[in-house]
Image (spheres, rainbow, N blue to C red):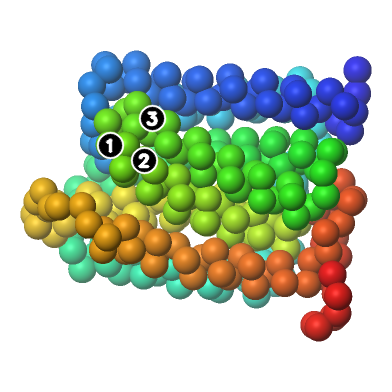
Amino acid sequence: MNYTHGKARLPLSLAIFLAWMAITILGGTLLSGGQKQSLIEGISKGPLWNVVAAFLFLVVMIIAAGWRDLKFGAPDPMSSLRIMWFPALYIIAFFGMAGLLGLPSLNLLLLILLSTAFVGLSEETMFRGVLFQALRTRVKLWPAMIWTSALFGSVHTLNVLTTGDIVGALLQAFTAMLSGFAFMAILVRTGSIWPAIIYHALWDFGTFAITASSGAAGTASPVAVNEWSFLLPFALVLPNFLYGIYLLRNVRNSTRLSTDEPEILPAGSPR
């Protein structure tokens, strides 16, 4: 059976997604012993073996299915540099904030780095790799990007199973959807999944480093959730989302099953 461009690709990809989600979420619940904990608390106890296992599962499935179109080729360095300047500003700002607050211990910092590296690998391979390319066999480019980003955001609601914080999980789901669209735009414009993986991993590393910093930990205290509590995460990721829109401003709603050569129109031309 043709698993590359045939009708079986999307159902197979969805089945792989469900299995990947079970490994990631249920594995995380088992590692925590069923206890509710924040994401940074889980990382501080050791590597996220459930995320590692989920990524390795994807590698096996991709090889078995024979998919060679998931954009794991190297991007053009100069083109990528022109696109990644804005994400670099985010990463510099995150690291600077973590440094000002007081970096966590080296051991915890290394655990965060290892865990977020595998999170970036696993989530980008699943969503911007397996699912996105499967959707491209059925729908045009823009619907595939939107559905992939929406699904990426929605799965973050399942973090409530680990953290017990439904409001936080819903907020994370919404901000993840916005950031996911930026990761999608980077993939389409660079033709490679690696810049999105690196940006995703560094984004998580920077935000977790801030959360775990001594200054943030020392000032943390229970606060009432109000409308301003929701505005800060939204304001943080909104420029990321708008930059993704900017990157895709002249990309056609192509029917081609490819992101190797995005169709770019002159400014002002109809899509």
Q: Are the residues flagged by discs 2 and 1 in contact, CB closer than 8 Å? A: yes
Amino acid under disc 2: Ala
Q: Position of residue 96 (x, y in %)?
A: 30, 69
Amino acid under disc 3: Leu
Q: Which residue is mark 3?
A: 48
Residue 169: assigned label: 2
Question: What is the quadrant of residue 245 in the picture?
Answer: bottom right
Q: Are the residues flagged by discs 3 and 2 in contact, CB closer than 8 Å? A: no
Cα distance between the residues tagged 2 and 1: 6 Å
Question: What is the quadrant of residue 163 in the picture?
Answer: top left
Quarter of the figure with the N terminus: top right
Q: Is residue 8 left or right of residue 77?
A: right
Q: Which residue is mark 1?
A: 165
Is residue 34 at least partly visible in the picture? yes
Amino acid under disc 1: Asp
| Among numbered discs 1 and 3, the one appearing first in the sequence | 3
Quarter of the figure with the C terminus: bottom right
